[in-house]
Amino acid sequence: MTQPKGPLDGVKVVACSTAQAGTVPYMLMADLGAEIVKIELPGVGDNSRTSGQVPGYPSSYFETNNRGVKSLTLNLKDPKGRDILYKLVAEADVFGQNFRPGAAEKNGFGYEDLKKINPKLVYASVSGYGPDGPHAALPGTDAMGQALGGVAEAYATPGQPLRTGIVSVADESCAILTFGGILAALHCARTTGVGQKVDTSLLGAQVRLMGWTLTTTMWRDRDPVTGQARVNGTAERPGMSASFADKDGKPFVFQLQGREWRGAMAALGFFEELEALGLGDLGVAVTSDEKREEMLTTLDACFAREGRDRWVEILRGTDIVAAPINTLLEASNDPDVLANGYVTEVDYPEYGKTAKVHGSPWKFSETPAHIGVAPKLGEHTDALLTRLGYSEAEIQALRDSKVV
C-alpha cells in the first residue's frame, strides 16, 4: 500500500545546521514530508553524531534531532563544494543555518549571497542572542538561553539559587518557533514570489516561552512569588496552581479558580478543617502572604494522608484539573502519551531492536506524519549529486579531492 504523503510533501530544504535548535525545525518538516538535505563535513559529519550515546543504540541526540533527513557531505570551503550548494539552493524552498553569527557570510552562503541565486528562498538563521544587540556576535547554547530568558525562575525554590534545567527548553522552543517562522515565510514566498530571511534566537524563544507571567511581572515591576504554588488574580477572583506530595512522597498538581475552591475541598474532605482556620475562601491567599503559607502548610498535611492516585481521582471527579507530576520516564509511559502517539517505536535492524522515540505532536487526518530514522554520514551524497547532473566519474573525482 502506498503511504499517504505528508502535508509538506514537495517542500525542499537545504540545511547547514548542527546541534538542536538548528536541526529540530527540519526534523519536524521531514516528519511531515519535506525533503531535507543536511550538509555535513566529509569524513567528520555533524559532531553530535556521537552525543547522548547509550550502549546498544545509535546516538540518542543525533537520532532525535535528525531523523528522516538526507545526508550530503560537502566541503563548503572548497569552491566546488560551494558550487554544489548553490545548485541545491537554486531548486530549494528553504535554507537553514545556525553557524556562529558572521560565519555564513564569510564563507559565501549568507542571505545576500543566496537570494541572488533564488529570490524566493526562505533563509532561516538561528542564533544565541538575536541579530541585533550588544552580544549578537557571540555564540549561544541552551544553558545560555535558559540563563538569560527567565525560565530558571519558573521552577525556583525560594531561598535557593536559580538553576538551569537538564531539558533543553531553550533549544526546543527556539526550534519550534523557527519551524513556525519558516512556514509563515514559505507561505508568503509562494503567494508573493518574494523570499526573506527569518531570524530566531535562543534568547527570543525563552522570552516568548515566559508568556503572560512575564507580562504580569513587567506590569507589576517585581519578580513573581515562586515555590510550590502559583496564586494569582484578586481577592474576588483568585486562582491557584499548586503541587503537593502524597503519603509516599509522590507529587501531583491541581489548578482551580476561587469559585471551585469550596466544592473541591469538600470533595477531598478538607473544607471544614480549612474553614476552621479561616481558609474557607481562596481569596485570602491573594491578600495575605501569611494566610497563603498557612493554607499550603495545611494542605501539605492533608494530602500526606493518602496516595496521589486517590487525590487525583477525586479532583478529576469534581471537574478540577489534576494530574500526577511525572518523571521523564513516567511521562514516556503515560497512557495518554502512548494513546496519542506522542511516543512511538521505530525499528533499528542493525541494532536488532525496536526502540521508543518521539512520535509526532500533530495528528493530520489526511496527511499523517511519518517517523523516520537519522541517515548515515553521506548516505545520500551520490543520489543527490546524480540528481544535480553529476556523472559517476565526476562524483568520484569530487570524492577523491575530498569535496564530498
Image (spheres, rainbow, N blue to C red):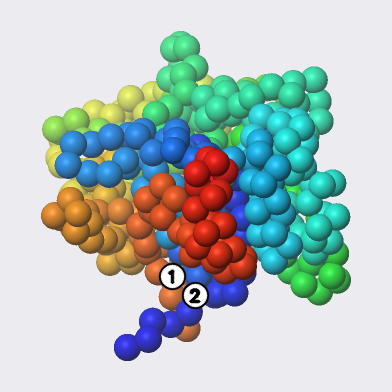
Picture coordinates of residue 151, whole percent (x, y): 54, 30
Quarter holding residue 206: top right
Q: Residue at x 74, y 24 (%)?
A: 137
Image position of 352 with respect to 158: above or below: below
Callout 1: 10 Å neighbours few (<14), some, many (20+)?
Answer: many
Judge from the rendering whether residue 32 lies leftward or rightward of residue 278; answer left or right.
Answer: right
> Please, what is the three-letter code of the amino acid marked with disc 2?
Gly
* Residue matched to label 2: 6
Label 2 – label 1 distance at C-alpha: 6 Å
Contact between marks 2 and 1 (CB within 8 A): the answer is: yes
> Please, what is the three-letter code of the amino acid marked with disc 1?
Ala
Q: Secondary structure at mark 1?
A: loop
Image position of 23 with respect to 8: above or below: above
Q: Residue at x 37, y 62 (%)?
A: 372
Image position of 168 with respect to 331: above or below: above
Task: In this rendered view, identify the residue nearer to me: 155 or 376.
Answer: 376
Picture coordinates of residue 150, whole percent (x, y): 59, 27
* Residue matched to label 1: 369
The dot on residue 29 is none
Judge from the rendering whether residue 146 lies leftward or rightward of residue 368; answer left or right.
Answer: right
